[in-house]
Amino acid sequence: MKRYLAYALIPVTPAFWSANYYVAAKAVGEIEPHALALLRWTFALCFMLPFAWPNLKRHGMPSKQEWIDSFVLGGLGMWICGAFVYYGGRSTSALNIGLMYALSPVLIALLSALWLKEQLHLRQVLGVCLAFTGVIWIVTRGDLLAMSSMQWVEGDLWIAAAVLCWTAYSLLLRQRPSSRDPFARLSL
């Protein structure tokens, strides 16, 4: 049953991420970015909590260090990063957000090799290149010349900062392992 659930949820993650970029571009002036980030993760928590509850219950109350880790990681990866995307969405397009966020796996892989001393394998490099190429192809609908007509605005700086926050979150997450399963940890 778990395998089928995992397969059924595969398209959910990219759908939510894509919807997030769309909302970021469309919610301009309607909802404050920090409030929107809070609403987004409150909705996500409501969805995840039923799945995470057994693990949360089994492991008991988090330690002081787990609370600190959750506060730092949640603040950086969910609140700040999320709000920055919404600030960026005020003046940039979903196209720019998608393209810039496509750099995240590249930055994470490179900085993991530099900062965490993780070995970068050829398959990882090829996977990152293929994924990035795929994102560019999809976002530009196969018209690579569309990238030359892109205009860079203040919102792009917010998105670049969000990408850096997400990269830092991803690297810190690797440095701070947890005995809880990923759903339970994210729910903290």
Image (cartoon, rainbow, N blue to C red):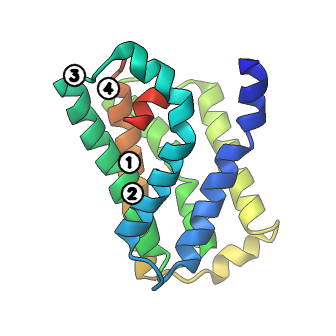
Instruction: Name which of mark 1 and mark 4 comes first in the sequence.
Output: 1
Instruction: Name which of mark 2 and mark 3 comes first in the sequence.
Output: 3
Is the residue 154 above or below the residue 174 in the image?
below
Is the residue 92 above or below the residue 78 in the image?
below
Real-space Cα distance between discs 1 and 4?
Answer: 14 Å
Mark 4 or mark 3, which is nearer to you? Answer: 3
Is the residue 48 above or below the residue 176 in the image?
below
Q: Are marks 3 and 1 in contact (CB under 8 Å)?
A: no
Q: Residue at x 52, y 45 (%)?
A: 46
Mark 2 or mark 3, which is nearer to you? Answer: 3
Which residue is under mark 4?
175
Q: Residue at x 36, y 62 (%)?
A: 161
Q: Is residue 173 left or right of 15 when viewed as pictured?
A: left
Label 1: how many Cα within 10 Å (few below 14, some 14–19, many 20+): many
Instruction: Name which of mark 4 and mark 3 comes first in the sequence.
Output: 3
Q: Residue at x 62, y 69 (%)?
A: 22
Task: Give the residue type at disc 2.
Answer: Cys
Task: Give the residue type at disc 1.
Answer: Gly
Which residue is under mark 1?
77
Label 2: how many Cα within 10 Å (few below 14, some 14–19, many 20+): many
Q: Are marks 2 and 1 in contact (CB under 8 Å)?
A: yes
Which residue is under mark 3?
63
Rendering quarter of residue 180: top left
Q: Residue at x 41, y 29 (%)?
A: 185
Which residue is under mark 2?
81
The answer to whether residue 42 is seen in the rendering is yes
Dot 3 lies on which element? Answer: loop
Dot 1 lies on which element? Answer: helix
Q: Nearer the viewer, residue 94 or 40?
A: 40
Instruction: Name which of mark 4 and mark 2 comes first in the sequence.
Output: 2
